[in-house]
Amino acid sequence: MNETTKFSCNHLSESKFKRDGLRPFFEYRDLGIQDATNGAVVAHVIRAVPGEHPVPRRHHHDVSFQMVYILKGWAEFEYEGVGRKRLTAGTCVHQPPGIVHKEVAHSDDLELIEIVMPGNFETHES
């Protein structure tokens, strides 16, 4: 290890889901990676708030890397130049930097892992 990163171990029993993330219809569980990497990477588990649904807005993120892995449930996204994709449990998506996209819908039981670089990034509506 070096001075810019530190060890991190995050247990479900020691952390909570919070409604403090980018989208109000999701709850976010910080996995401690952003703190461990001094902001270089953020990783969190995101789950749907049952009964609350997305307001589809085209946007993109200022990132160098973004990956989504669906743990359970499903979500539909529309990607510029790709089209609509239905993501189900076990689906892994790499969203290239700057790709314009929008979430169209998701199941009430949606749960996913998202990993993004850098940890602090900006989102712009398109």
Image (cartoon, helix red, strand yellow):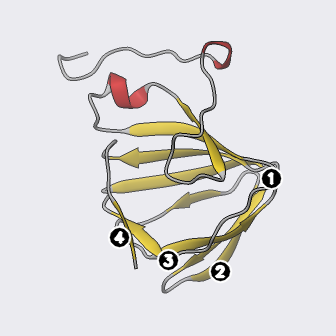
Q: Residues within 10 Å of mark 3 (few under 14, many from 20)?
A: some
Q: CA distance from mark 2 to mark 1?
A: 17 Å
Count residues near mark 1 (Cα–Cα under 10 Å), then give few for <14, some for 14-19, many for 20+: some
Q: Secondary structure at mark 2?
A: strand
Q: Which residue is mark 1?
A: 73
Q: Are marks 4 and 2 in contact (CB under 8 Å)?
A: no
3 or 2: tag closer to the N-terminus: 3
Quadrant of the snapshot with the N terminus: top left
Which label sits in the foreground, 3 or 2?
A: 3
Whether pointer 3 and pointer 4 mark residues with C-beta atoms closer than 8 Å, the reply is: no
Secondary-structure class at tag 4:
loop
Instruction: Report if the CB atoms under discs 1 and 4 are less than 8 Å apart.
Output: no
- Which percent across, then down, holds residue 75? 72, 63
Horizontal placement of 92 versus 8: left or right? right
Q: Nearer the viewer, mark 3 or mark 4?
A: 3
Residue 12 in the figure: left or right of residue 115: right
- The residue that appears at 80% across and 53% down in the rendered structure is 73
Residue under label 2, please give it: 84
Residue wearing tag 4: 98
Name the kind of residue labelled 4 in the image: Gly
The residues bearing labels 1 and 3 have C-alpha atoms spaced at a distance of: 22 Å
